[in-house]
Image: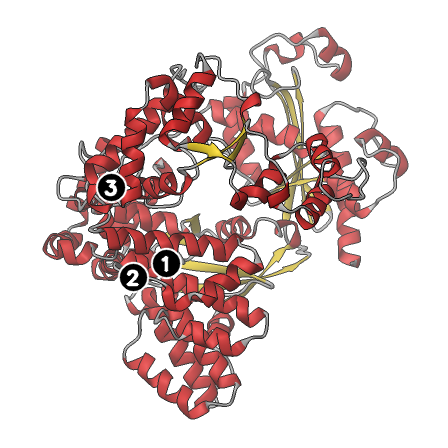
Amino acid sequence: MRPVRPKRQFRELPQFYYHAHFTDLLDFVETRYEHCFRDQDRAFVKSFHSLPFPAQCLFIRLAGRKGLIFDLRKLNYPEIDNLDLHIGELREVGLIRDVSDSQFYRWLEHLTKPDLCQVLDNASIPILFRSSWNKARLIELAQTELDPAHVVIPDHFVEQQAAEVLNYLSFLYFGRLETNLQRFTLRDLGITKTPNFKADYSARFDSLEDAMSTYFYAKALRTAKRGTEDALTDLIDDIEQWPAPCSDTASDLRGRLLFKLGKLCERLEDHDLALDLYERSDTPDCNERSVRIRYARGEKADVETRLKALIDNPGSEAELNFATDFYARKYKKKRTSAFTDLLRSGETIVIDEVFKDQTEQAVIHRLGHDQIQAFHSENALWRMLFGLLFWPLLFGDKAKALHSSFDRLPASLKAGRFYDDHEVEIERILSDLNSPACLKIRILKTFTRHHGHPNGIFRWSDPLFDLVQALIKQAPPQSFSTILRLMCQKYRDMRDGFPDLICISESGIKFIEVKAEGDVLRKNQLTRIKQMRDAGISTEILRVEWAVDPAQDYVVIDVETTGGRAAAHRITEIGAVKLRGGRIVDEFQTLINPQRTIPPFITGLTGITQDMVADAPKFEDIAEELAAFMSGSIFVAHNVNFDYGFIKQEFNRLGRHFSRPKVCSCASMRRHFPGLKSYSLKNLCRAFDISLDQHHRALCDAKAAAELLTLVHEKRAQA
């Protein structure tokens, strides 16, 4: 029996936890980022440190709240005494002030509905409105009709003055835009774990210019994603004043920003502006859009020159694939794209449509029926292998800088410098792939020593680790060393897009990308398949078509139990029938000794007594026979989660994993026979004249549910 996972216990936070979090961040950036401070940052730090402890706490409370405007009458912090005194101290150092005219419209949005009505009533000119209007309508009216110069804002409203400075200092710490310090709180509560690979951390920015350019593009990219039309227009109008990117990170953000704005302009059908934006960047995405726009305009000679340049000097393998494919289709009269060619090259299999919501699991199930072991792998398998293999270089003494305790990826990996920084060590490790036995020992030691340590590359998983070991044992060393080298060189590009499944057999391994009807092949998936094939790794496309499969086996199961909860109760009887082509081809039935008392109510319902199960087999005695009976079949029951849950729990108690595709005959009847008053097994049997003479005995109920399933199959076949 597997041990029950203990309930997570959250830690209690000390009274002034928020002060500790804020000063931790402030001390950290003062120590490591003084070279990135602006005059206003130094002024803020000086002002904050000059405040007494309660005033610091009050400011942190205000800074952590949403918005910049606060009504002092509504502040209530029991742990901070004499709020009026500390409000005055914040005013004195300039961290809060009376609401300025520039914040007038934000002040209106902050008001309650009654306060808004009062402001409109007191306007210098009559304004017609109804107090029954909703708040949004009242705010719109006030913003349109009120003149800030003629409205007196009460002095109990104040404006927080350090928001932009706090955003910048937070950005220095986290390397991303954060609006609060919630990550500290989640860490201290024990909800999230933070890696603590090193006792010290280096600065992520080399200079003020580097920090400011990266900060600018991070904010601009957020505006491009969330901003108003006016904000986006202002951003584009000011493009000549954008700062020069001073790092790879800033350049990447700038490229993403230009691509985002270009796509927006395309949607607005301003293709001239879109083209201007795209051609300010040399990223693969921008290059592709530029080529497509120019080709649509008829600039074929220019596009041909651009494509040849991209083919000769591509920015990435994905860009090379695009340029090669586009050139072949537009200039060599190739009829179909590389995506279509690859999809069409895949084998097609027909799978019963009951699996439509679980395509990959359906393929695994189907391959298992053909005696082929397949497992879900996708990106997780390669990420775990990469992380375990290069752990000492990523997170050990030779790692190239984490910047804070919240960082999960080393800076060199993020910035694409990992291979350049560690080329000799990486090649030595890759050469060890020729000795699978030694390699397995190495990654086993890493897995054992660092298990559970938070990192940004992979999740710790025992079943996944088993697949990693199988990959090492059976894959040609040179093949997967090629893929791992690419991951070292361009981790950001290589971290996803890997095929869905891995098949393992004595003859070797094979990867499969599964595509159902209507699925498309993404650029990164096409690139990864080509890379794996070029490396000599067997990689295929498997296309799935849905149909009613008459050859599919179904096992319809009913269990009788000692109660309603699988975790607390046990099975007393199992009845099952195997259905193939609409006919029952096999049966399974047995009483089960539940190893506990059967309540009188249950005996009254089922007729199963304690004496009847006293000499019956225990579940462990019939587990193997039942598993064999269900092998290759779809699990069916009426209200399937009940029966499935009890069977799964019994296998779990034996330490055995249980997973089957499942179908609910009750839900299926609702879908295909709508409008009935009741979908209970008893009432459905009455409605369709199905025998149920021993209701609440397992085999009888299983046979009845099997007849309902046959009705469903007839409906599906007609459809």
* Label pair 1/3, CB-CB below 8 angstroms: no
Please tell me whether residue 256 is drawn above or below residue 324 in the rendered image.
above
Residue displayed at 56% across by 52% down: 359
The quadrant of the rendering that contains the N terminus is top left
Q: Is residue 620 visible?
A: yes
- Measured as percent of width and height from the top left, residue 326 is found at 44, 81
The quadrant of the rendering that contains the C terminus is bottom right
- Measured as percent of width and height from the top left, residue 243 is found at 32, 62
User: Secondary structure beneath disc 3?
Assistant: loop
Q: Is residue 683 left or right of residue 123?
A: right
Q: What whole-number distance in Å separates the C-alpha atoms at marks 2 and 1?
A: 9 Å
Q: Is residue 233 left or right of residue 483?
A: right
Tell me the residue that label 3 is attached to: 403
* 10 Å crowding of disc 1: few (<14), some (14-19), many (20+): many
Name which residue type carries label 2. Pro
Tell me the residue that label 2 is attached to: 245
Name which residue type carries label 3. His
Labels 2, 1: front one: 2
Name which residue type carries label 1. Leu
User: Secondary structure beneath disc 2?
Assistant: loop
Q: Which mark is residue 253?
A: 1
Q: Is residue 454 visible?
A: no
Q: What whole-number distance in Å separates the C-alpha atoms at marks 3 and 2?
A: 20 Å
